[in-house]
Every structure is written in structure tokens, then in C-alpha cells.
Amino acid sequence: MRLFVNVDHVATVREARRTVEPDPTEAAVLAEEGGADGITVHLREDRRHIQDHDVERLLRIARGAVNLEVAAEETVLSIAERLRPAQVTLVPEKRQEITTEGGLDLGPASRGRVRGAVTRLRAAGIRTSLFVDPVPEVIAACADLEADAVELHTGEYSNADESERDGQLTRLASSAELAAQLGLAVHAGHGLTYENVGPVAAIEVCEELNIGHSIVSRAIFVGIAKAVEEMRHAIDTARAEG
Ligand code: PXP
């Protein structure tokens, strides 16, 4: 199980003052020291946290893979094509949202736009993942689009109360199985914490988790390397126990 650490919220603190610290790329180096396999950053169209220069610097200094999250929009797709990170995850984006809400819309009206983005990224030699809700028809659409991977949106699982959690976990596990059967690599993320990551980490076909807010929150108290180490431990323990 690969752990990708999302360092957007280090940049959120910096942008609160429009200054130079804390530096998300410095956090990335420390996250790798703590056991992150890769670093995720979301280059939002409104540039509310990560900036273009962060992505450029991250690609120079990261030892592991960089997963760049972008919307399927020209302004950011062309940056992805130029910078060529190892992986791009296409995400939906709304200006007013606090964080990414819901997975990509792959209905008839928007599928063509996503298909165009996948084709462009593939031509640039970039592995492409689609951030989607755990819904069978949507997973099938991702296979039709010939993406390399799906990132299953774990937000509803994370927000579920105790009575709903098992149902949400079953949705994630069966979507993961379907994706794997259709030849897609399976990733997951959003809202995962030290407390709720275990059952998702135990989904055997899932090979990558993207986690940001919980790790950055913990890092305020224990430092980023230690916070990542603790998450790694939670994931590895759940995985070993099945
Ligand atoms: N995956 C995607 C596609 C996201 O947009 C985000 C949030 O930026 C995450 C994972 C990480 O979510 P969280 O910060 O809640 O761990």
C-alpha cells in the first residue's frame, strides 16, 4: 500500500499571510523521511494554496512520485503536460467549495471533456487517475475512458455515523473489486484519519491512499515526519491484520 501525503494545507497556512513560510515542499521532504511513498498537491484554478512554483520545486526535489491533482480544464492541464509529474489525478472543482466535493461527473455531458484530458495526459506519458464516487456505473465509465487508475472518494465513508459506516465500506470494497476486475489500479482518499483509515487500508486491491488534512493536523503537534510515520503504522497494521 503506497501512502501519498497531500501537503496542500501547509500552503494554506502560508497563503493565510501571503508569505514564504511554511514551505509545502520542505514538508514534502520531511513527509518522505517519515515514510511517504509520494506527495500529492492540488493545483486549484483559484490557486488558494499550492502555487505553480511549488509544483515546479516539488518535482525537482521529491525523491518519490508526485501526484498532481487538477481539474479537467485547459489552464491547469497545459501546466500538467509541461511539468509531466508521474501521475495526474483529475478532480472536479467548484470555486466556492471548502474542499473537493463529490467525485468527477462522468455523465454524457461531461464525459467528452474528461476523455479529452485523459487522452492528452496519456500522450504526455503521465499516469492518469480519476477521482470518483464508489458507484459501479461510474467505475465502468472510468474503464471506458481508459484511465490507468481510479481514486475512490472516501468522503461519505469518513463522514458516516456508526450506523452507516459498514454500508459505506461495503460500497468502497465492491467498487474497488469492480475497478480491479476492469483492469484499473485502485486508489482511495478524502477525509481519512488515523481513526478511520484501517478498514480502507485493509481493502486488498487498493494500492494507494491519498491523505492530507489529518496528517497535517497531527503534524502541528508532533512534526510532519512523525505524523506520517504514525499514519504509515496505522495503514501497515490494518493491512497485516486484513
Ligand atoms: N484525494 C483527493 C482527490 C482530494 O481532492 C483530497 C483533498 O485535497 C484528498 C484526497 C485528501 O483529502 P484529505 O485532505 O481529507 O485527507
Image (tube, rainbow, N blue to C red):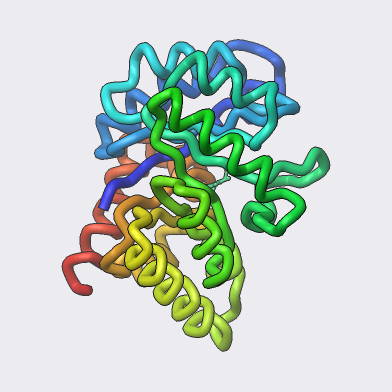
Is residue 75 visible in the rendered image? The answer is yes
Above or below, 147 relative to 195: above
Left or right: residue 212 versus residue 65 is right
Residue 68, x across and y down, in percent: 49, 31
Residue 74, x across and y down, in percent: 68, 25
Residue 136, x across and y down, in percent: 53, 72
Left or right: residue 48 versus residue 214 is right
Left or right: residue 74 versus residue 79 is right
| Residue occupying the point 65% across, 36% down | 72
Q: Quadrant of residue 180?
A: bottom left
| Residue occupying the point 25% across, 30% down | 33
Above or below, 216 relative to 171: above
Residue sitting nearer the eye, 56 or 115:
115
Extreme residue in the left direction: 240
Q: Quadrant of residue 46?
A: top right
Q: How many marks?
A: 0
Above or below, 3 relative to 75: below
Residue sitting nearer the eye, 37 or 33:
37
| Residue occupying the point 22% across, 64% down | 237
Residue 126, x across and y down, in percent: 41, 30
* Quarter placement of the C terminus: bottom left
Extreme residue in the bottom direction: 163
Is residue 220 visible in the rendered image? The answer is no
| Residue occupying the point 45% across, 39% down | 128
Extreme residue in the right direction: 96
